[in-house]
Image (spheres, grey):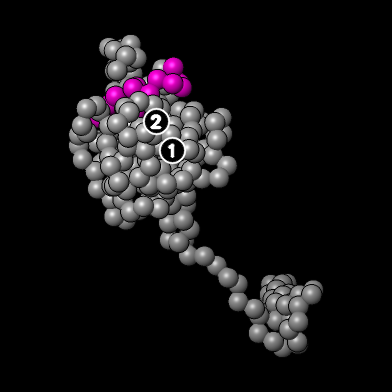
Amino acid sequence: MRLLRTLSGLTVAGVLLSGCAATGGPGSTAGPGAAAPAVATTPVAAVTTLDTAATAASARRYAFPVAAKNVSWHETHSGYRATDIFAACGSKVVATTTGVVLEISRTDRYRKGKDGPYNGGLFVSILGDDGVRYYGSHLKSVTKGIKKGVRVKVGQQIGKVGRTGNASGVCHLHYGISPACARVGDWTVRRGVVWPYPYLKSWRKGGQKSPVAAVKAWRKKHGCKA
């Protein structure tokens, strides 16, 4: 008899709980006898996918410097170790990695036939948190708010592809990798001393190949003289 009374009590409790769910509880607009509202749930697979994507994004250290579908570049460059990345004028130029802006030019001071620090026209150079300097020039424009001393994040837009400076009238991004020797003014180093191609190839495919070792080796061998 005690067992029957216990079961009966459980049945009544179940009915009362069911009634609470049907009315929606405090604040609910559902009337008596209405069906219990469906509970929204996210499939486990979807949660796992989102978590994986978030982790991958937060782990990204390097980004290809031009955010455009159609780009092309060569393994070599005339005269010194750099790369010209060809893309439509106005294409987004982004920070290769997280770091601080070292130098910036919003004015095209280049004069035809005069080789020197103004060759790049409008440009931005960044000292990455990895200790490497990344330089992009011939820009059409520099993004508002980008100035010397400002921190930028990997993939953040810093300008647009253009043809300022000694760009021969062709829209492209001149791209150089180097150690930040004098940090400013050392334009022959800033324009590029380590071949960027293998790193660009990796970043374009979502890889994270780092130029840190190559830059350190160059600096040890050359002492910042290009």
Q: What element carries label 2?
A: loop
- Tell me if residue 185 is in the magenta stretch: yes
Disc 2 marks which amino acid? Tyr
- Please name the residue shown 48% across and 29% down the image: 103
Disc 1 marks which amino acid? Asp
Residue position for label 1: 108
- Please name the residue shown 55% across and 35% down the image: 147
Magenta stretch secondary structure, dominant: loop
- Tell me if residue 204 is in the magenta stretch: no
The quadrant of the rendering that contains the C terminus is: top left
Mark 2, residues whose alpha carbon is within 10 Å: few (<14), some, or many (≥20)?
Answer: many
Q: Are marks 2 and 1 in contact (CB under 8 Å)?
A: yes
Q: Residue furthest right?
A: 26
* Relative depth, front residue between 90 and 57: 90
Mark 1, residues whose alpha carbon is within 10 Å: few (<14), some, or many (≥20)?
Answer: some
Residue position for label 2: 118
Sooner in the amino-acid sequence: mark 2 or mark 1? 1
The span picked out in magenta is 182-195
- Please name the residue shown 48% across and 38% down the image: 107
Rendered view: 22 above or below 71: below
The image position of residue 195, as x and y in percent, is: 25, 30
Rendered view: 38 above or below 42: below
Residue 99 seen: no
The image position of residue 76, as x and y in percent, is: 20, 34
Tell me which corner region of the image, top left, top right, bottom left or bottom right, holds residue 203: top left
The image position of residue 199, as x and y in percent, is: 29, 36
Relative placement, left or right, of 63 versus 204 is right
Residue 82 seen: yes
Give the alpha-carbon distance from disc 2 to disc 1, as whole Å: 7 Å
Relative placement, left or right, of 48 versus 74 is right
- Please name the residue shown 66% across and 80% down the image: 36
